[in-house]
Amino acid sequence: MVKTVVGLLRHGQTDWNIDFRLQGVTDVELNATGIRQAQLAAENLSGDDWDFIASSPLSRAKVTAEIVAEKLQIAEVQVLPLLLERSFGEVEGMLYEDWKRLHPDGIAPGGETEEQLHARTLDLLEELLELYRGTRVLTISHGALIRKVVNILSREKLPLPGERIANASLSVIVHDESGWRLENYGPAALSGS
């Protein structure tokens, strides 16, 4: 039996997270709290549990990944473009509540649709198998993408309505002979914040 384990770690906090602004593919840096969250998350992880670290190309994920990699003594952070956050197009930078008020249908003009995000998530799962089959890879990514992975693998049971995926939280998915499954859903921050 070949078992592939994938950790889904969300990046640390940014100033836009505090304000509940849609970040999408806008490259917003970690703030001081986000750096500390990444450090605390790293302290709650073991290098014995992970063979590789892969990150979204956005700096908030890459810096989180670099902090974790240093603590776990994993030499290289591999960048995977499919780990990128959902693009919210014209509404990036907008407060989440304003977006929902102006676009109650959830559409982000000029951004990635739910259907496109779903298809990209399936592509990501395939790529993870191609690159990391039979190993343990910790991925550092973003809230909307992690939500989509969890939603697909839980057969739309998780996340619960209105539930947030906290910064520096970790969920784990596994692939074996029966396919992909959600092994551990962890929406709370590893850092305890």
Image (cartoon, helix red, strand yellow):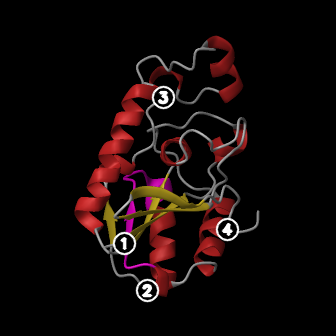
Chain part drawn in magenta: 50-62
Q: Mark 1 points at which residue?
A: 3
Residue for badge 4: 190
The residue depicted at 68 percent of the width and 37 percent of the height is 20
The earlier-in-sequence mark between 4 and 3 is: 3
The image position of residue 37, as x and y in percent, is 65, 66
- The kind of residue tagged 4 is Leu
Whether residue 60 is in magenta: the answer is yes
63 and 122: which is toward the camera: 122
Label 3 residue SS = loop
Q: Nearer the viewer, mark 4 or mark 3?
A: 4
Q: In which quarter of the image is the N terminus?
A: bottom left
Foreground: 27 or 118? 118
Q: Is residue 112 visible?
A: no
Q: Which of marks 2 and 4 is nearer the N terminus?
A: 2
- Foreground mark, 2 or 1, reads 1
Q: Which amino acid is tagged 3?
A: Phe
Q: Is residue 48 magenta?
A: no
Q: Which quadrant: the C terminus?
A: bottom right
Q: What is the distance, in whole Å, between disc 1 and disc 4 at their CAs? A: 24 Å
Q: At x 24% / y 64%, what residue is drawn?
A: 131
> Which residue reaches farthest left?
130
Q: Quadrant of residue 87?
A: top left
Mark seen at residue 15: none
Residue type (three-letter) at the residue carrying disc 2: Gln
In this figure, which residue is indicated by the disc labeled 3?
88
Label 3 – label 1 distance at C-alpha: 34 Å
On the image, the x and y values in percent for residue 122 come to 35, 43
